[in-house]
Image (cartoon, helix red, strand yellow):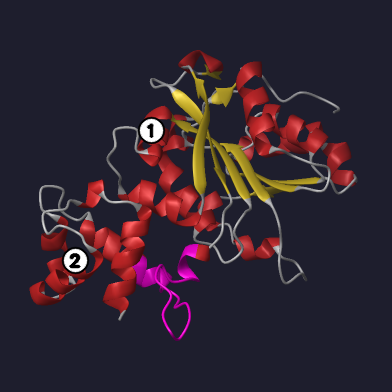
Amino acid sequence: MKKQLDKNKKAKKSLGQHFLTSTYALDQIVKAGDITSSDLVVEIGPGKGVLTERLITSAGKVIAIEKDRELIAGLRESFSRAIDGFRFELIEGDILDFDTETLRGSKKTISYKVIANIPYYITNAIIRLFLEATSQPERMVLLIQKEVADRIMARDGKESILSIAVKAYGTPKVVAKVPPGAFNPPPKVDSAVIVISSISKKLFQMSAHPNKEGDASINEKTFFKIVRAGFAHKRKMLAGNLTTLYKKDAIAIVFKKIGMPMKTRAEDITIQDWKKLAEEFSK
């Protein structure tokens, strides 16, 4: 590395920047990534490059997307050798405008990992972008707000649209808690490193209950349409919320068929229950 980025560069509140400074947190992120020399890694918001440097050392290639133009020149200079060696590619732009299909190149399939300390205010959007993509990553390791990580894990025993969305595609696990002092400037909340592994769309490719014709697929859009409707009004029962999509009689028949009480709430059922609902309503 030729030169370190300007350590005095102030974080931009508008971009949700909190530069990571903790060696412990960096170690936990890299370890959770299970990175090999054959891996393609996508990093979101490399900032001053402290995580980037470690990723480049471990991975075969790193593609980083940075929105802050003031950081671009410093990143290019710091990692010029990696750029020249085709081990690092820096893209200036907004991650929410990033097309994951560009990762394919001429290949029909692509295997990659997303590893990043992301802006907290677009956490949900980033997770959706990659999990819903046609070209999904095999693993995501994200440093996010601890409260959001707890919601994904349903620590309080209550599921949410976010937790169901994540579990529909992969297996989440919190591997480390990161205090505010691990950043500059420190955020006002605790953070956590979360890993989403075994990412796929298998849930939408096989039926929960095979029939004589074989396994039936569940439409991905229909599944989430039902989930969103189910969580629409927190105070209402799930059956009541679903009346925006289906008639009461049809809902009662489906609930009885899968053994679900009519007074069930959306937050109390599992990903497999949602799958059964989607399957039956699709019929």
Dot in front, 1 or 2: 2
Res. 21 visible in picture = no
In the rendered image, which quarter contains the N terminus? top right
**The C terminus lies in which quarter of the figure?**
bottom left
Q: Is residue 209 left or right of residue 283?
A: right
| Amino acid type for the residue under numbered disc 1 | Asp
Residue 261 in the image: above or below residue 171: below
Q: Which residues are magenta?
A: 203-223
Q: Position of residue 5 (x, y in %)?
A: 72, 25
Left or right of 80? Residue 225 is left
On screen, residue 71 above or below 84: above
Q: Position of residue 45 (x, y in %)?
A: 60, 39
Q: CA distance from mark 1 to mark 2?
A: 29 Å
| Depicted 220 relative to depicted 33: above or below | below
Q: Identify the residue at horizontal 22%, vertical 54% (top origin).
A: 231
User: In the image, what residue type sits under mark 2?
Assistant: Phe
**Residue at the spot 48% in from the left edge and 33% down from the top edge:** 144
Q: Is residue 220 magenta?
A: yes
Q: Residue at x 48, y 17 (%)?
A: 179
Element under disc 2: helix
Indicate left or right for 207 with 175 as reference. left
Q: Main secondary structure of the magenta part?
A: loop
Residues 143 and 213: in front is 213
Which residue does the numbered mark 2 point to in the structure image? 255
> Residue 246: x percent and y percent?
16, 74
Measured from the top left, where is residue 154 in percent x and y? 34, 38
Q: Label 1: which residue? A: 150
